[in-house]
Image (cartoon, rainbow, N blue to C red):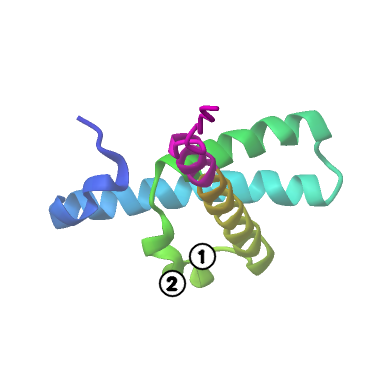
Amino acid sequence: MASGGSQYETMDLTDQERYYELLTWWLILHENIYHQWKKGLMDEDIYGAWTRDLKRFLTTRDITRFRSMWSDTFEVTFIEHIDELIAENKRQQAQKQRKLCASEKPGPAATSTNS
């Protein structure tokens, strides 16, 4: 059963290596797409679809644990792009959490005036 990176620490060494390699290939695909778009070789609508896929992927996988290994694998502007997407996701999650907390707070107590 696939568990993604959520159970990385409990994987044996072989499964950890498999996971890292699959993650690397997935990000290489997205790096290629990113650079094609930057060079004007990809339609904005197509790039938008791939970006939504990458954002979804980043919200469902904890890949920050591998961040220190990326400089040997990926071009720096792509790493910055991934960092921006992760930061954007964290901001959006924090904003959702604030809204949720605000909606759970009780309103001001109703006061009645008895004359």
**Can you tell which quarter of the image residue 99 is in?**
top right
| The magenta segment | 96-115
Q: Nearer the viewer, residue 99 or 81?
A: 99
Circle 2 is placed at which residue position?
68
Q: Position of residue 36 (x, y in %)?
A: 76, 46
C-alpha separation, residue under disc 2 versus residue under disc 1: 10 Å
- Compare marks 2 and 1 and give the one earlier in the sequence: 2
The location of residue 92, given as percent across then percent down, is 58, 46
Residue that numbered label 1 is attached to: 73
Position of the N terminus, as image quadrant, is: top left
- Residue at (14%, 52%) from the top-left corner? 10
Q: Residues within 10 Å of mark 2 (few under 14, many from 20)?
A: few
Residue at image position (84%, 51%) is 39
Identify the amino acid type marked 2: Ser
Any magenta on residue 102?
yes
Residue drawn at x 52%, y 36% is 56
